[in-house]
């Protein structure tokens, strides 16, 4: 699921402040060690499940000693990689777009695929049939989508803020709203399905009574990114390692990308244009 944009906005301000205080990005201090940055998986902010296994796999792949750096949040991860304290970072799409905005010293090299073959998600406007013009419930994590898309086609009716995605779904199920902004996995060539649509059906609505009137451009799952000054041989070794991980070391994949178990594909910065547009829209000053 896409990182909450409300949290992204505050995280963006913190990351930009950290970078402004640090001055220009520094070079990697020790190219003989591969430092891997990952955001903590526990509230204490100090643990990565399977860190020892991950370190060994990366070391075997590159021939370098590998160390996992645990970041408390994405602002800390961005700051560490822009300063050169880590060489490799695991990002959400939004966090990567923000990192590129803060420092152009990062490059995406690979991104995960879902076990269902999905490569990312789309935002969708879901309506009950015959509810055109009715209130559209908007969860907090849809803010960035609406800011970058401006006004989704098919949504002339008023928006109503929902406290959460679950609250937006409840509003649609109960009839308090005639539509909502939700999410579906993006599988190239496939019709919108799964995600919010599946949850609404599980809550008692008929799939035949639900229309998808608008869908955003697909947002890729977040990339693994390296510093641009990483040696080409190390970068190539990392790409080979990641794209072969699903078949060669599924136990490592389970820890490295626990939410998406379909493996990795090669990506570049251009694959995150949608995320960049969202971050740019959120960063624009409020009209006076």
Image (spheres, rainbow, N blue to C red):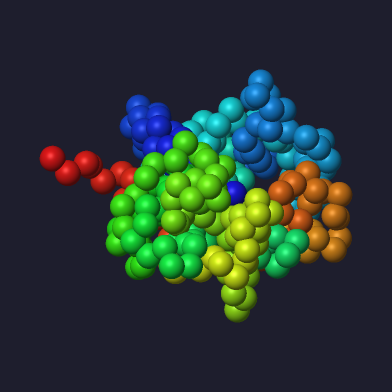
Nearer to me, 116 or 160? 160
Q: Quadrant of the C terminus?
A: top left
- In the image, residue 124 sits, relative to residue 85, either above or below, namely below
Is residue 282 found left or right of 99 in the rendered image?
Answer: left
Residue 59, how many percent across, how many down?
78, 46
Is residue 155 in sight in this rendering? yes
Residue 180, how many percent across, how many down?
46, 54
Quadrant of the rendered image containing residue 108:
bottom right
Quadrant of the rendered image containing residue 67:
top right
Is residue 231 found left or right of 247 in the rendered image?
Answer: left
Nearer to me, 43 or 212? 212
Nearer to me, 135 or 109? 135
Q: Residue at x 58, y 28 (%)?
A: 72
Is residue 89 found left or right of 248 in the rendered image?
Answer: left
Q: Residue at x 80, y 48 (%)?
A: 254
Residue at the bottom extreme of this rendering:
189
Q: Residue at x 62, y 76 (%)?
A: 190
Residue 4, how many percent across, how many down?
49, 41
């Amino acid at each position: 699921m896409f990182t909450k944009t409300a949290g992204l906005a505050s995280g963006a301000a913190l990351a930009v402040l950290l970078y402004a205080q640090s001055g220009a990005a520094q070079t990697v201090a020790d190219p003989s060690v591969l430092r891997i940055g990952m955001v903590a998986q526990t509230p204490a902010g100090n643990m990565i499940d399977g860190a020892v296994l991950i370190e060994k796999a990366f070391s075997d792949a590159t021939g370098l000693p590998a160390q996992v750096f645990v970041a408390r949040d994405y602002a800390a991860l961005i700051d560490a990689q822009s300063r050169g304290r880590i060489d490799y970072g695991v990002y959400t799409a939004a966090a990567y777009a923000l990192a590129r905005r803060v420092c152009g010293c990062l490059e995406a090299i690979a991104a995960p695929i879902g076990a269902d073959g999905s490569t990312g998600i789309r935002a969708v406007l879901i309506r009950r049939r015959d509810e055109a013009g009715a209130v559209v419930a908007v969860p907090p994590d849809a803010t960035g989508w609406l800011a970058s898309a401006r006004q989704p086609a098919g949504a002339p009716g008023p928006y109503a803020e929902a406290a959460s995605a679950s609250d937006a779904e409840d509003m649609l199920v109960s009839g308090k709203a005639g539509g909502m902004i939700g999410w579906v996995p993006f599988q190239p060539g496939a019709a919108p399905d799964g995600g919010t649509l599946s949850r609404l059906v599980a809550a008692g609505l008929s799939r035949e009574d639900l229309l998808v009137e608008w869908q955003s451009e697909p947002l890729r799952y977040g990339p693994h990114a390296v510093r641009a000054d990483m040696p080409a041989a190390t970068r190539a070794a990392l790409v080979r390692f990641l794209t072969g991980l699903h078949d060669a070391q599924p136990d490592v994949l389970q820890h490295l990308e626990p939410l998406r178990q379909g493996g990795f594909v090669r990506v570049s910065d251009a694959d995150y244009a949608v995320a960049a547009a969202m971050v740019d829209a959120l960063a624009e000053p409020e009209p006076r």
